[in-house]
Each structure stands twice: as C-alpha cells, then as structure tokens.
Amino acid sequence: MKTLWLLTIALGFSSGFARAAAATNLKITKAGNGVNVEWNTEAGNDYQVESAATLQGPWQKRTELTASVNTLSWPDTELAGVSQRFYRVALIASAVPKATFLAADSVADDTGTLGLYTSDIGAKAVFLASQLGAGGQQLLTTGTLTEQGQNWNYAPTPTDRLLVQFQSGTNLNYYVTRMEGTFSGDAANFLQQPHVFNYRVTSPPTMDLTFTTEIPSGTCNFAATARGTLAWGGVTYTLDLTLAGQYCFESGFGYYSLLNDYRTTGTVTAPGFNLRVDQRRRFELITSDRDSSSSEEEWNNNTLTVGADTFKWDNTKKQKSFKNGKPSSIDEYWQAHGAVLKNGAAFGTYRRDASAVLQIIKFVLVLPDDVVDLETWQVL
C-alpha cells in the first residue's frame, strides 16, 4: 500500500530541553531523559515513526503502531549524545483489517449461539447439582460440579455461584438470578417449555456475559438479552444485544422438529470498532430415528463504523443445509449474496466458493483488494 507522509518535525536540544516546530497534528514534548512523539490518528490505521539526524536523511524506522483511538504516542529514550533529531510519521496501512469484517459478520450471531449453548449447560448443571446435592428435593444454584470420567461429583462450595469444571480444563461460573418454569422433567424439557432463565456466566478471560431468556406461557415466542464482554479473535468486545423471535419444537413417535427464528439488534463495540447490529437467523431441524436434516439462513443489515468510514451490510444472506451433520444440497441450496457499502458506495460482495479438489465450500466477502473467508466447511 502506498505510504502517505504526514508531517516532518525537527527537534533541537538546548540545556537538555526539547523544542518542537509548530505542527497541527504532530507534537513533540520533553519526557524524562527523552522525548514523546504524539500525533492524531484514525482508528484501524497503521503508522510508522521514523527519525533522522538531518532532513535529508537517511531515515530510520523506529516503531510501528496500530491506532485504536484518535491519538498515538511513542517515547524516544535513545537520545544520549544526540544534539539534533528529526521525526516523521508515515501512514503505512489505511485498509481495515480482514478480521474486522469477519467480526462484523459473525460476533453477534455467535453470541446468540453461545446463549443457547450456555443456557443448555447452565440448566443441566442446576438440575444435576440439585439431584446430587439435594436428591432432587431442592433447587441448587451454587456449589461445584466436577467432571470425572463419565461421572460428576458435587460439592456445596462456593456459595455465591455454581462452578462447572470440565475435564478439558474449561471452567464456567454461573450466577443464576432467576429460574422459573417446569422442573418435573429434565433440563431439556425445562428449556423447551415456557420459562424464565436469567444468569451471568463467566470464563476468564474469554467471557463475562449476562443472559436473560423468557418464553411466555402458551407461545413459542422468546425474548432474550446478552450483555457483557466476549473475547473473539483476539479482541475483547462489549455486547449489548436483544434477541427476539420463535423457539418452537414438536415431537412425536420417532421424530423431532425445531424452528429457531430470531432477530438480533443492539451494539457490539471495541476500540476502533462500533457495530450497530441488525441480523436475522432462521434454523430448522427435523430428526427421525435414523436421519436428521437441517437448514440455516442468515440475513445481515449491520452498520460498522471504523474511524471516518461507515460500512453498511445491504441485506447480505448466507444459507446452508445439512443431512446427518454433513453439508447437503450444495449446488441447489448453498448460496451467499448481497453487498457491503462503504460510505454509501459499492465496496464488497458476498459469494459462495467451492473446491471439488479440496472438498471444501466457503462463504467469502470479496473486497476491492482482498477476500475475507467468512465460513469454511468440509464436504465429506
């Protein structure tokens, strides 16, 4: 990418104090035995600080930094014996990282899936603790469940949360604040029937999320919220999401069906990343004694602000189907389409790619000078 030189500034030394020429967005100040170079930035851009003994150079790279806020600074402490030094800052990358677009596509949707996953574990943990610790006569939401082989052991401490310890080393802390519903069956029956289940789940440093879920009596509609922090792709995001839709199931002799269709709205933020969420996911599953079939559709109308740029997902869509856990109807059903706009102008497109040789299928976002892999599936 072409380098953009921002400003050049000269620094002289007199009695150990620094003097900086006037500049609008580059400032040099005395800092201990050295100087501090500070400049205005745009979040998401990469900058390189260079120095030289004269304006003619040669210029030497001193450091490279990525901006997550509106200003960056760098201390130069290697000034022993130096009487004069010039500095300049270069913008070396203005493109938004691919990981940013991947996060805008996936974080909110993954949070919805995480809510289903943690509510399932949390409900099972409460039912199991209540059985092991109170013989099923009392609802226990505190203590410790420890996985040992095919069995679980229960201990009554801690008394402020329910700690679930897996053999894999993963630990989940559940702080259950409200749990109402049908307790005559198992945890799966509790979640499928009208209920209220509110809890905070932590697993440092990966997540600290508070979920609320409710399915009113007489309906299969549901409302949920997800608030807190989630580490995803090496970045910690702050979430404030609302989910609303349907969670309907039906079962009979030898079959089971599930419809989970909901919309997610709210915000996902991180330094230099501000996402306004508007997504929809529709998942359908039908199982029998021998087979299972499922389909999934995802629509995205998110708006992402990075620095001075605004990216708008223009009703992009991904859809896929599976039979017995393997991709099915690839040529007929699997597809991805829609556009991403940058400041109102055409910028990126969604596309499905497939490789018969590698036996993989991908959903990708095609950008002007790059391709972002959104999902990759093995076709077996």
Image (cartoon, grey):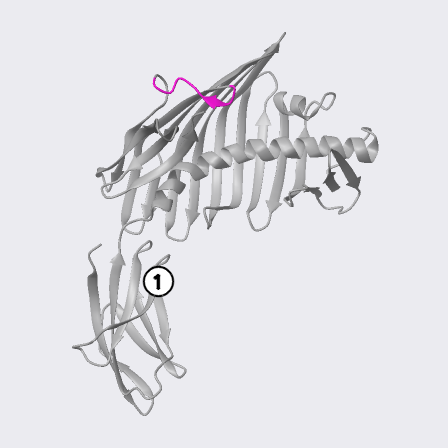
Q: Position of residue 172 (x, y in %)?
A: 64, 43
Q: What span is in magenta?
A: 324-331
Q: Position of residue 137 (x, y in %)?
A: 82, 29
Image position of 149 (left or right of 222): right
Image position of 244 (left or right of 20): right
- Could you say which is closer to the camera, residue 29 or residue 283? 283
**Kind of residue at badge 1:** Leu
Residue 190 can be seen in this image: yes
The answer to whether residue 46 is above or below residue 145 is: below
Is 377 a magenta residue?
Answer: no
Residue appearing at x 25%, y 41% in the figure: 342
**Split into 4 quadrants, where in the image is the N terminus?**
bottom left
What residue is shown with label 1? 65
Residue 41 can be seen in this image: no
Q: Examine the image and state in which quarter residue 319 appears.
A: top left
Q: Position of residue 59 (x, y in %)?
A: 23, 73
